[in-house]
Every structure is written in C-alpha cells, then in structure tokens.
Image (spheres, rainbow, N blue to C red):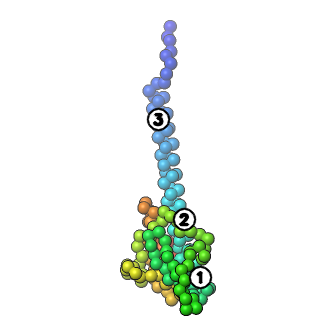
Amino acid sequence: MYKKTAGFTLLEIMIVLAIIAVMASVAVLKVSGTSQGGFINKVNKIAVFFEVLGDHAVYTNSVLVCEPNPVGLDCKKYKNGEWNDISLSQITTWRWPEDIKIEQVLINGRPMKQGDKLYFTPDYRAILLSIRLTNGVYSAWIDNDLTGVYKVSY
C-alpha cells in the first residue's frame, strides 16, 4: 500500500515562485510609470505657471522680475515706481513642487549667469527662455516661443 507524504513537490513550489515574480515585476513597472507620469504632470503645470507670470505682468501693467533658485523663483513686482516682493501664491494657488529643481536656465540660447534675472513685462517683450527641470530621476526642458507660450520636451 502506498502512503502519501504531506508537503509540496518541487514543481509546485517553482510555479508559485514564478507567479510571485511576475506579479512583483508588474508592481514595479506600475510604480515607476506613475512616478514618471507624476513628474511630467508637474513639469506641465510649471510650464503653465510661466505663462501665468507673463499674463500677470500684462493684466496688472507691471514688470515682474524673477530670480530662479534651485527650488523655484523669487520674484519682485515693479508698478507705479515701487518695487515690492511678491509671493507666487498671490498670483496662483498652485505651489512649486518641492521635489522639482531648476537645473539650468538658458536666456536667448545662452546659459544664465549669476545675477541674471527673468523679466515678464506688460508689453510681452519676449526673450527665448529654456528651463531644465529635474526631480533627480527624470528631467525635462520647458521652452517658450516669442508669443509667450511655453512647451515641454522630454
């Protein structure tokens, strides 16, 4: 008489491990895809934000002068002969994402030098502006055309 012993065969264990490996790889792909999608979403919002800065200068008939720093912009507003610090939250409710850093700025194709500033004027005196953003993993460029429209390239 044959007596069956308790336990799993080697084949059964290998099949279960293969299923777990496939499930884990799908989970890793979803997580990395989401982080790239999140990065792209944030960069697109920043591109719109630059358009809003230009529009704000036009609608308030003032000059905005912004100095990029690694985690956003420091801006001043000139109107009626006075310079005032301006909080970006006064222009929009959206806040600069903490994980997005400005890596490089090009003005008219040349690297921005120490002390250079970005100008947004009521007459839309256009400069060609390119901004490289990163979150440490992904990077993208925001470029404008001479009409004040900003586009993202990856």
The residue located at (50%, 18%) in the rendering is 6
Q: Residue 19, position in %: x, y?
A: 50, 38
Residue 111 left/right relative to 55: left
Q: Amino acid at mark 3?
A: Leu
Callout 3 secondary element? helix
Q: Residue 55, position in %: x, y?
A: 59, 82
- Give the foreground label among 1 and 3: 1
Q: Nearer the viewer, residue 31 or 46?
A: 46
Mark 2 closeness class: few <14, some 14–19, many ≥20 residues within 10 Å? few
| Residue 1 in sight here | yes
Q: Nearer the viewer, residue 137 or 28?
A: 137
Callout 1 secondary element? helix
The residue located at (53%, 56%) in the rendering is 34
Which residue appears farthest toward the top when viewing the image? 1
Q: Amino acid at mark 2?
A: Asn
Identify the residue position indicated by label 3 in the image: 17
Q: Earlier in the sequence, mark 3 or mark 2?
A: 3
The residue located at (47%, 81%) in the rendering is 118
Q: Residue 125, position in %: x, y?
A: 51, 89
Q: Nearer the viewer, residue 97 or 148?
A: 97
- Give the foreground label among 3 and 2: 2
Q: Earlier in the sequence, mark 1 or mark 3?
A: 3
Mark 3–mark 2 Cα distance, whole angstroms, equals 36 Å
Mark 1 closeness class: few <14, some 14–19, many ≥20 residues within 10 Å? some
Identify the residue position indicated by label 2 in the image: 41
Callout 2 secondary element? helix
Q: Earlier in the sequence, mark 1 or mark 2?
A: 2
